[in-house]
Structure formats: C-alpha cells, structure tokens
Image (cartoon, rainbow, N blue to C red):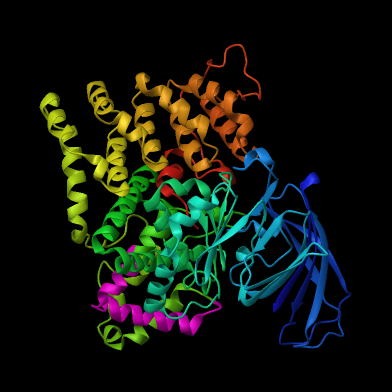
Amino acid sequence: MRHRGLTLQLAFQDWLQGGAQEQQLRPPHTSVPESNWGARLDPFTDYGSSLTVTLPPELQAHQPFQVVLRYTSTDAPAIWWLEPELTYGNAKPFVFTQGHSVCNRSFFPCFDTPAVKCTYSAVVKAPSGVQVLMSATQSTYVEEEGVYHFHMEHPVPAYLVALVAGDLKPADIGPRSRVWAEPCLLPTATNKLSGAVEQWLSAAERLYGPYMWGRYDIVFLPPSFPIVAMENPCLTFIISSILESDEFLVIDVIHEVAHSWFGNAVTNATWEEMWLSEGLATYAQRRITTETYGAAFTCLETAFRLDALHRQMRLLGEDSPVSKLQVKLEPGVNPSHLMNLFTYEKGYCFVYYLSQLCGDPQRFDEFLRAYVEKYKFTSVVAQDLLDSFLSFFPELKEQSVDCRAGLEFERWLNATGPPLAEPDLSQGSSLTRPVEALFQLWTAEPLDQAAASASAIDISKWRTFQTALFLDRLLDGSPLPQEVVMSLSKCYSSLLDSMNAEIRIRWLQIVVRNYYYPDLHRVRRFLESQMSRMYTIPLYEDLCTGALKSFALEVFYQTQGRLHPNLRRTIQQILSQGLGPSAEPSMEPSAEPGSTGADSPALLLGDEAPGSTISLRDVNVSA
C-alpha cells in the first residue's frame, strides 16, 4: 500500500463521522488470476470484519490502482465523542480518536497491522469554530470552505493516524513545538512545558540522530482520554489530568518524544513484539532523562517502575504467558490486551542488558542511531534488531553473547517471568534510600517510637516519585495494623491531601484497603472531582473488593452524570461484579444501594480497563 486518502465530515449533533477513503495500492509481483471484480464483507472478530476485494483480471503486476470506500462511523471504539459538559471549558463538543492497537479499523477501513505503512492525506469538514488537528506533517485551513487539509509525508501504520477537534487554542513553547489545549488550560500547559520540549528533542537528537517529523506539538485532551499519552507523530496526545503531576508529565512526554525514533520511525511489525517499540522507547526515554536531569533521577523513576513490574508479576504469577516479550497472539484476541508493564519494563531490561554487553552506553547509542537510520519508516521483527546488534559489534558475535547460559537472547524473548537481569540502580540510592528507611520505620516495633522517628522526616521536600514509591510500598503491605494506619493518617493525611493526584490516589487506596473510615470523606471528595479513568477505576476496584461497595454505589450515583459513557459502563461492570453475578447497578439509586453479594475481585473488563488490582495505577499506560 502506498497512500491513504481520507475525506471526512464531522457531525457533532449526530455523533457521526462520515467518510470516503481512497487507497493506492500495487498488485502482487505475479499477474492477477482470472476473476470477477467485486468485494465481500466477511466475519472476522468481535472488534472488526474483513473486507475482501477481488481484483479485475486485466490488472497487471506492479500496476498501481485505487480502491474507494464510502462509510459512516457512529459508535466506534476509536472515536470518542464528548458533550460540552465532559470538557474543562464546558463550551463546545469535543471529539478525539485513539487508534492503538487496532481501534482505527473503526475510524476508517484499513490494513490494521503495524506491518503495513503508507503516507496519508485527509480533507476534514467540521462545524464553524471547531479547531481540527491531525497527526500530519502539513496542515492548512480554507476558511471560506470550512475545510482542513492534512498530509503526512512519511509512511506510518494505521494506528498512528489520529484526529482531534474541539475548542482548542495554540501557544508556542519552542522553535518547533506548540501546545494545544482548551483556553482555560492553556496557560498551565504553556508554563509547564515552555522551553522543556526543545531541550528534550535536542538531547534525543544528540543520541539518536535528527528528528525527522518536522514539528513536535502536544495536544492536551479532556479527562475522558482512555490512556495517559499517545505518540501520534507530529502531535502527541496527552491527558490533561497529568498536568498537576510535574514529574509524571515530564516522564510521559519524554517517553512520547522517544517514540519519534522507536515506534513511529521504526515500528514493530507484529503486535506480538510490542516491546520493540515500548522497550526501546523506555530505554531511550531514560537516556534522555539521564542527559537532562541526571542519573539519580533516572534511577529513581526506574526503581519506581520496576517495583510496579514486580507487583504485577506477583498478581499474575511468574508463569503468565503475557510476561513473555514474544507473546503468542491467538486468532481473534485484541492486541490491546497485551499492553502491560512487561512490554515496557521487561523490554527495557533486555535493551539495557544489550547496552551492557557492549560495555559503553555511548557506543550503544551509536548502534541505535545506525539501527534507526537503516530501518526508518519500515517495520521490523526482533531478529532484525538482534542481527543488527551482532553485526554492529562483531566482537560480541565472536564471543557468542547471544548464547550465554541463562541469558540467551531466545530465553529473554520467550521465557515467562521477571527479567533475566535488571539494571544497577545504585546511582539513585541518594533518592531511594530515604524511601526504604521511612518504610522500615513504619513497619518497625514499637510503633510509638517508630512513628516519632518517622514524623521527623519531612516528605514535603521529596520528589513525587519518592513519595509515590513510599506509598506503593505501604499499599503492598496492606492491610496494615489499624494503629499503624491511624498514625499514618495523623502524620501525613493533611499533607498528602495538598499534593498532586498521583500522590493522593495512592494514599486514598491505602485508606480504602485498610477500611480507615475517618478519611473516607477524602475518597468521596476525590472521586467527585475526577473524570479520568486513571484516577477513578483503581479506587472503584478497591472499594468493590471489600465492605465499601455501598459507599462506591452511593458515590457513583452522585457522579455518573459527569463521566464519559465508556467510563460509566466500566464502573458499572466493576460495581455489578462486586454486587454478585446476577446484579446490575441501575442508572438510578435503589432503596438499598448497599445490598451486596459475596466479595469478588473485579475481573478483566476487555477493552474497557486493564482490570483487577493491576489497574491503571500500576501501569500508568503511555502507549
């Protein structure tokens, strides 16, 4: 496939996107067999159907041809329509698309595999006053026609075609970057990122070669955005909720910057090897943060993520097939279900191990730069990366490093369980040691003496990742003795309540998991103020695994009108599983909202949530 041409019309009043698509293709190398020209729609999976096109017999080998498809999308998984009330400004309707991994087949007909890349263009007509943006290298607006024109000059897979439209205003934050946001959010977004994105892009270019996408813009989306961030080329999508958590914002944007080389330019050819994008992007992200913020900060963030990886491992078990880097994707299984911390952190550990084999991070940077130059704008498999690595370092090939006992490349790719080796994080000990010391104090005897010593440590001066790591350790140890929770609340509750949402949700999960009723009003206030799945799903899951189901129902009935329908359905599923197999929470409160069945953990909710206590708190998914 060579080019995709989209003609789209957005109809907010009907939540309808109409379109036509022209696809420019080449037939196979051999002549097309005799057949009748036609098309048929075949059953495929629960998330799409296959369209089979039969080519006319007179079409010659290598002769380009076009297929034009006209279609309408309404209730499509890729397209998220928002009423004005679900935006921050409450002024205009909003729509965005989210194509990863295979949702864009509901946005436009396509070869929905990362192995197929092509350029694309789009013509989009939208109501007056609505700003439209796409992940494209060129864009123009014809005001008298009310039409936007977009063009992506580099080949990209279908999942990286993205659109957003709403009440969005721009502000420049660097020579090749601007932020887009609703007017009420624009000053905050500008202040947080002004000058920083250019610093990160320049660091990445020093490591991995020229940035090849022209502009690097960022659009902040309403809290209904289902993940934290998405690396759409030229236009990173990121959830506005993360703006209040500075360190998470920095890491998430740098991760998407790294995808410009690893994932967007060089893409995994199959979803079974998603680590080729995520593991390499995570490694590159940490090289960039080391260059800009130092090794100690990078080691702290890595320790925080690896801690979450081991938590996920304990929940799933070491023999879980999804802990492999080369996951076997069964027919009909949605690849989105493979998004987990193994893809990111186990993949990162393997890439870090490769960097250690060559003995010098700078030499490994040179290899990755050559790898990107060789494979840019194509899709690869793991063997391409590993063959290139051994060719770049022939001395390592002579030493048969790919076959070292216990660390074989094949075992890295196909063994279940934790990483075969993890990075040395001792350079971050100045930041992680105080966390360990404080946690040990709170689990020591006698409590009075330990609490007195702990209260002398001022965590208000800690980095966000330090406080989050400390709270995660307490969460792992929950349920805690009630006297410990009472002392923790006395010492920290008011302070933590003034911190960002990443901190507050962790403390509130401790409150819920330990049934600490004096602080339950803080849980209610938090859920009343949040519309994002990343800050609601984990709390509802915890509330519904114990004696607080009636409280969860009460809060949900009061807040459901402010939630996106997709999120509302997810929470309803969590609540109904907490209520037992035959119950289903209605949209209105019943006379006895607290009547519940036996306790049961929230189950995997398909496309709607990562599920169970692994949840978004642990994954904090940035695609």
In the image, 406: left or right of 336?
Answer: left
Region of the chain picked out in magenta, as a range: 349-378
User: Is 323 or 608 nearer to us in this picture?
Assistant: 608
Instruction: Specify whether residue 497 is in view.
Output: yes
In the image, 290: left or right of 45?
Answer: left
User: Is 318 or 431 nearer to us in this picture?
Assistant: 431
User: Is 387 or 514 nearer to us in this picture?
Assistant: 514
Query: Is 376 in the magenta?
Result: yes
Query: Is 35 in the magenta?
Result: no
Measured as percent of width and height from the top left, residue 216 is found at 53, 68
- Where 278 sits versus 615, above or below? below
Q: Residue shown at 25%/64% (left/top)?
A: 295
Q: Residue shown at 23%/77% (left/top)?
A: 359
Q: Residue shown at 30%/74% (left/top)?
A: 355
Residue 386 sits in which quadrant?
Answer: bottom left
The N terminus, quarter of image? bottom right
Residue 69 sits in which quadrant?
Answer: bottom right
Q: Main secondary structure of the magenta part?
A: helix
Measured as percent of width and height from the top left, residue 445 is found at 11, 28
